[in-house]
Amino acid sequence: MQSMSLSFRKALLSLAMISLIAGMGFAQSAAPQTVKKPSATKKPTPAAPALQLAPKALDILKATSDRLAGAHTVSFTAVELFEQLTRQDVPLGYTAKYEVTLQRPDKLRVLKPADGGTSDFYYDGKSMMAYAPVENLLAVADAPATIDATMEKAYKLAAIYFPFDDVIVANPYGDLAPGLKHAYYVGQSHVVGGTTTDIVAYAGDGVFVQIWIGADDKLPRLIRAIYLDDPDRLRHELAFTDWKLDESVATDTFAPPSSASTAKHIPFAPPHPEPPPSAKAPAKAKPAKAQ
C-alpha cells in the first residue's frame, strides 16, 4: 500500500498577487495619511497539540485484538480499494478481493480474485505455495512454523504482502502498540458494515488509520489508511464482511486445487528481481503512472 499529493501553491500565489495589486491601486488613488504604526509584536507560535493515547480507543483496539487472537479458526472476505495517480495527477481507484481462511498457528489460505488477475496463496504448516490459475503457474517453498513467520518470509522472498496482515497476526495489538503515536475515539456509526461500529483513529509507524469496529462483536468492518510520508496522500481502504470465528475447516482447505498439479513450477521471487552486480544501472526515471 504506498505513494501520495495535491498542492495549493498556485492558488495561494494568485491570492497574494491579487492582494498586492489591490493594495497598490488603493495607494495610488487615495491621499496619503499619517498613521501611527503600532509597534511590531511577534505572535507566539502556538504549541503543537500534545499527542495522546486515549484509554477508550486503546481498550477498543485491545478488545479487537483479543477477539481475533483468541479464535482458533478465522475466515472473512476483504475488499481493498486503493488509489494510484494518473498522468493528470488525479487518483484512480483499483480494487482487489481477498477470501481468507486461517487456522492458528500454522495454516492460511488467501484466494485473491483481483481486477488485474487472480492469485492464490496456501500455507499448510510446512510449505507455502503461490498459485496463478489463469497462467497455470505454481511457486513452492519451505515455510516456517507459524503464520506470522511465513508472511514475513513470503514478503522477503517474493514481495508478497496482504493489506490485512495486521488483522491475522498472532497478537494484533502487541504488534501495533510499540509504534503508536496517538489514538483517540471518534464516535459511532450505524451505517458501516450494517451494524453499530465504534470508530477509532490512530497513527504510528508513518501511517494514519481510521478503523470501524463492531460495537458488540469487536470485529473490524472498515479500515482507512493514509501513509504520512506519501506526498500525494493517496487513500487505502479495506472493507471486511462474512466474519466466521471458531468454525470447523476442512483439512484440504489449505492445499491448492487439483488443477495445480499440472502447473508450471517457478521459484518464489520478487516481481522485479534485482539485476546482477555487473549490470549497468539504468537511468533514473519517474515511476510510471496509470493511464
Image: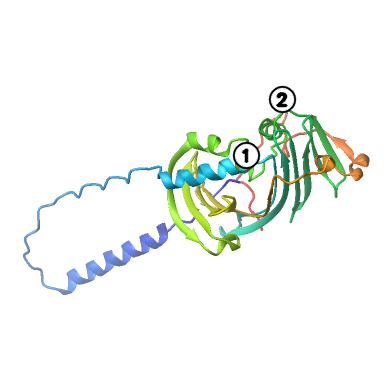
Tell me the amino acid under the disc marked 2. Ser
Q: Are marks 2 and 1 in contact (CB under 8 Å)?
A: no
Image quarter of residue 152:
top right
Q: Nearer the viewer, residue 5 or 96?
A: 96
Q: Which mark is residue 109?
A: none
Q: In percent of the image, x 50 and y 55: which residue is there?
A: 198
Which quarter of the rendering shows the C terminus? bottom right
Q: Going from the N terminus, do you reach mark 2 or mark 1 first? A: 1
Q: Which of 118 and 68 is in front in this view?
A: 68
Horizontal side of residue 21 vs 126, given as left or right: left
Circle 2 sits on which residue? 278
Position of residue 103 measured from the top left corner of the image (x, y, whole percent): 73, 39
Q: In percent of the image, x 49 and y 47: which residue is there?
A: 60
Q: Indicate the secondary structure of the residue bearing disc 1.
A: loop
Tell me the amino acid under the disc marked 1. Gly
Q: Neighbour class for label 1 at 10 Å: few (<14), some, many (≥20)? A: some
The single residue placed furthest to the right in the displayed view is: 262
Q: Nearer the viewer, residue 21 or 75?
A: 75
Image quarter of residue 127:
top right
Q: Which mark is residue 70?
A: 1
Q: Indicate the secondary structure of the residue bearing disc 2.
A: loop
Q: In percent of the image, x 40 and y 62: which residue is there?
A: 11
Q: Distance between the residues labelled 2 and 1?
A: 50 Å
Q: Mark 2 against mark 1, which lies toward the viewer?
A: 1
Image quarter of residue 92:
bottom right
Q: Which colour scheme is used?
A: rainbow
Position of residue 18 measured from the top left corner of the image (x, y, whole percent): 31, 67
